[in-house]
Image (cartoon, grey):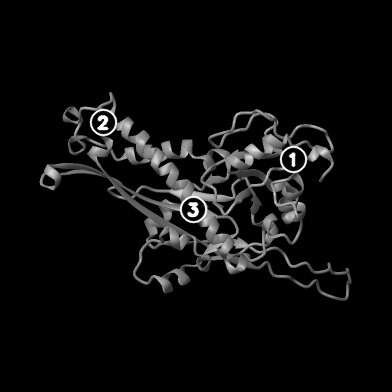
Amino acid sequence: MADITVATQLANMQIPESWANYVVQRAVEKDQFFTSGVIRPVPDLAQKLMANGGYVVNMPMFKALADVDPQIPDDTKDISLNAIQTDKAQARLFGYNQAWSATDLAAELTKTDPLEAIAESIGDYWRHINQKTLLTTLDGVFASDSMKGINQFDATDGRTSKDATFSLKNFNRARFLLGDRYQDLAIVVVHSDILRQLQDANVVDKDTNKIIINSGNPVPTAISAPNPGDSIKGVKVIADDSLPVSGGKYTSYLFATGAYGWSEKPPAHAVETGRDPLRFNGVDYLINRRRFVLAPQGMSWDESAFQQAHPHQYFPSMADMADGKNWVRKYDPKTIPMIKFTTSNDPITPVSDGSH
């Protein structure tokens, strides 16, 4: 057990302002959704938003051109003009604060480089929060009225098939919800239980007779480039045990690269240390403050709905992010680069046995 009597006191440490960026970078470097390409950085978005004030940034976009028949050339008539319609999607500035006492960090503070030790520990914490935030926004996106019955396939509802597993047939049903844009989907994130089932089933592609996921491969613990063969129809398989599991139902997600945009700008006093000499005979503490934008492509944050429900609340909570009332679909369903795929925990029947 560490001797906290010789630990470096947080209140006496000189933490540079750049340390906040360093902690965020550590969290991003290990974050599964960032390293896989699901989240794509949008430079300076948060900085511009914070510089201009307010909580919402409007992102103009062009709507798809109307599908009307072309005009027939006629030298007695003018060519009619069709307007290019525009729209805008809103991205919300989110904010988190967190604080730790020195006793929680006592073991790390006795190491050679206290700042690096704290950064590793707090970076891991924020990495977990990053993942939780993204999954929470997905709850809200797919609970939106504008997303009802869109880009969601639940193999457990019994309406399409008796097979409720993550079989190749069900996987194809899920990804072809995007129609001819199915090839945009590059990443599927699954619970490790589902990955284990896929490996146990030794799923084989009927067309190439090639093993899709090699039985016995180690289960990935972080999003990274999978080993050769660890893909389904060219879609990389990633394991993440923070995915929703309820009543034997597993939620997986398919994403196109850059399905989410992200931008972060540490606010003033992003990191503070201090000491209260009276509380508990003296407590050192460390405070983190974060301000960032995390925006799913094709969806818009409904600030008016949020303000109506919480007129005096500056930043949305995770419960607000998960509330479908705060999200509105702006793009055509085929261009929403994500699919929600629900399956059971039943063993997967191997494709190669002719049952699918």
**Can residue 164 be seen by looking at this rendering?**
yes
- Give SS at disc 1: loop
Q: Position of residue 23 (x, y in %)?
A: 37, 38
Identity of the residue drawn at 77% across and 48% down: 169
Q: Residue at label 1?
A: 233
Q: Position of residue 247 (x, y in %)?
A: 57, 54
Q: CA distance from mark 1 to mark 3?
A: 29 Å
1 or 2: tag closer to the N-terminus: 2
For residue 299, which quarter of the picture?
bottom right
Residue furthest bottom in the image: 76
Question: Are there few (<14), some (14-19), or many (20+) residues within 10 Å of tag 3?
Answer: many
Q: Which mark is residue 294?
A: 3
Question: Are there few (<14), some (14-19), or many (20+) residues within 10 Å of tag 2?
Answer: many
Q: Position of residue 261 (x, y in %)?
A: 53, 50
Between 23 and 59, which is closer to the camera in this rendering?
23
Q: Residue at label 2?
A: 109
Between 257 and 130, which is closer to the camera in this rendering?
130
Between 189 and 259, which is closer to the camera in this rendering?
189
